[in-house]
Image (spheres, rainbow, N blue to C red):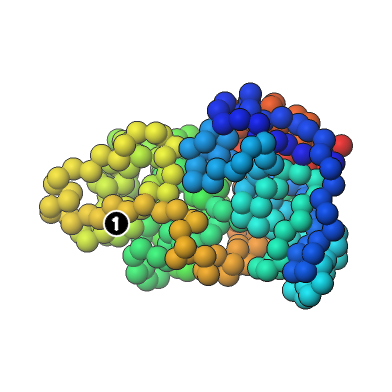
C-alpha cells in the first residue's frame, strides 16, 4: 500500500518519503476503513514535519491532518456511516496513505454531488473561520469584520460564513487581481494591503468601524487592522504567515481598549462546535458560495515535488488514490 512517511523532523523536502507499507488491519468495533481520495498539504502539516506543531508523532509515521475518502468497510456496531459513503478523514487522522482505519465516531456522509477536492479541505479552514466569527465578539447583522490573508482558505471561508450571517467584510489582499474574484464570492470591500488601501477603507467606512479583526499574517498587516478597529474591539490571530510579531501600540491599548487574542482549532473548548460548521461548509461548497482554488495535485509518489510547490506558494492536494 502506498503512503508517505515522516522519517525525521526537519526540512519537509528531505524528511518526507514515499513508501510501500502493509495494509491496515480490518476495522474493529466502532471503526471504519477509509480509502483516501485527496488530502491537502497544509502549512500545519509542514509544521508537524518541522517538529514545531503540538502534534509530534513517533517516527517513522504517516502524517496528513485532513482529507476525504470513501468508506470501504465498517466494523461491528457502526451505524452512522455505511460502505460507499464519502466522508472526511478525522482531524489529525494521518491521511497520507491509501487506506486508513479510524474511529467511526463523528463521521458523516458528505454530499454526493460535490467535487471531492473541495471537500478534502473542509476539516480545518472552514471551522476555523466560523469559530473566529462566533467565539470572540458578539456580532450582529450589518457589523463589519476586517481580515487579512483574505485569499487564503480561512479567508475565503470567513467571507462565506460572514455573508451567510449578514456580516460585512473588509478583505485585505496582496495582489490587485484578487479583488474581483473575492468580491464575486461575497467580499464587501476587497482592498490591496497598502497604506493607500487603508485610506480607501476608511473613506468607505465613514463613521463605522469593525469590532473584530482576523489576523493570519502579523507584522504591518496586523497594524493596519488595528488602525481600522473601533473602541472595545478585538484582534484574533490564527496564523503567522508573515512571521513578524503583531505590533500593538500603547495608544490603541489605552484609548481604543483593543484586546489581542490567539486561536487554535484544537483547543478543547472548540471540539463540540466543529462538526456543525463542517456540515454547513459542505453546503456552502455545494452551493458555490465557498470555493478554494487548487494550484495542483500530485500523487503520493511525488511528495517531494508537492512539498516544494507548497513552499513556492499555492494550494496543493495529494491525489492519494492515484497510482
Question: Which residue sits furthest top?
Answer: 14
Where, by quadrant of the figure, is residue 98 drawn?
Answer: top right
Q: Residue at x 65, y 57 (%)?
A: 90
Judging depth in this view, the residue of 152 and 241 nearest the camera is 241
- Relative to 144, residue 220 above or below: above
- Relative to 19, residue 80 above or below: below
Q: Residue at x 36, y 39 (%)?
A: 218
Judging depth in this view, the residue of 105 and 222 nearest the camera is 105
Q: Whole-percent x and y of residue 161?
A: 51, 62
Q: Whole-percent x and y of residue 281?
A: 60, 62
Q: Whole-percent x and y of residue 267?
A: 46, 58
Q: Residues within 10 Å of mark 1 (few under 14, many from 20)?
A: many
Q: Residue at x 66, y 52 (%)?
A: 93
- Relative to 46, residue 209 above or below: below
Query: Which quadrant is home to the C terminus?
Result: top right
Q: Which residue is mark 1?
A: 234
Q: Whole-percent x and y of residue 1?
A: 85, 41
Where, by quadrant of the figure, is residue 63 drawn?
Answer: top right
Q: Residue at x 85, y 47 (%)?
A: 23
Amino acid at each position: 500500500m502506498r503512503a508517505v512517511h515522516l522519517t525525521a523532523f526537519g526540512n519537509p523536502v528531505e524528511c518526507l518519503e514515499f513508501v510501500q507499507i502493509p495494509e491496515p488491519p480490518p476495522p474493529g468495533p466502532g471503526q471504519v476503513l477509509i480509502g483516501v481520495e485527496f488530502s491537502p498539504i497544509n502549512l500545519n502539516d509542514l509544521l508537524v514535519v518541522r517538529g514545531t506543531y503540538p502534534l509530534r508523532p513517533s517516527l517513522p509515521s504517516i502524517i496528513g491532518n485532513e482529507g476525504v475518502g470513501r468508506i470501504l468497510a465498517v466494523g461491528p456496531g457502526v451505524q452512522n456511516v455505511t460502505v460507499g459513503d464519502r466522508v472526511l478523514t478525522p482531524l489529525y487522522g494521518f491521511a497520507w496513505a491509501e487506506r486508513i482505519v479510524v474511529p467511526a465516531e463523528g463521521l458523516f456522509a458528505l454530499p454526493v454531488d460535490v467535487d471531492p477536492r473541495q471537500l478534502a479541505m473542509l476539516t480545518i479552514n472552514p471551522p476555523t473561520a466560523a469559530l473566529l466569527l462566533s467565539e470572540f465578539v458578539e456580532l450582529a447583522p450589518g457589523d463589519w469584520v476586517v481580515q487579512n490573508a483574505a485569499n487564503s482558505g480561512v479567508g475565503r471561508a470567513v467571507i462565506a460564513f460572514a455573508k451567510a450571517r449578514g456580516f460585512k467584510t473588509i478583505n485585505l489582499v496582496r495582489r490587485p487581481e484578487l479583488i474581483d474574484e473575492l468580491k464575486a464570492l461575497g467580499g464587501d470591500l476587497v482592498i490591496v494591503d497598502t497604506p493607500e488601501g487603508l485610506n480607501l477603507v476608511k473613506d468607505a467606512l465613514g463613521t463605522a468601524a469593525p469590532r473584530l479583526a482576523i489576523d493570519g499574517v502579523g507584522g504591518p498587516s496586523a497594524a493596519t487592522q488595528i488602525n481600522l478597529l473601533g473602541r472595545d474591539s478585538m484582534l484574533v490571530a490564527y496564523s503567522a504567515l508573515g512571521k513578524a510579531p503583531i505590533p500593538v501600540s500603547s495608544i490603541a491599548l489605552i484609548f481604543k481598549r483593543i484586546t489581542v487574542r490567539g486561536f487554535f482549532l484544537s483547543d478543547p473548548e472548540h471540539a463540540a462546535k466543529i462538526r456543525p460548521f463542517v456540515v454547513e461548509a459542505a453546503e456552502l461548497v455545494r452551493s458555490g458560495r465557498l470555493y478554494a482554488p487548487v494550484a495542483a495535485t500530485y500523487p503520493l509518489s511525488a511528495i517531494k515535488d508537492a512539498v516544494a510547490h507548497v513552499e513556492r506558494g499555492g494550494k496543493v492536494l495529494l491525489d492519494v488514490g492515484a497510482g
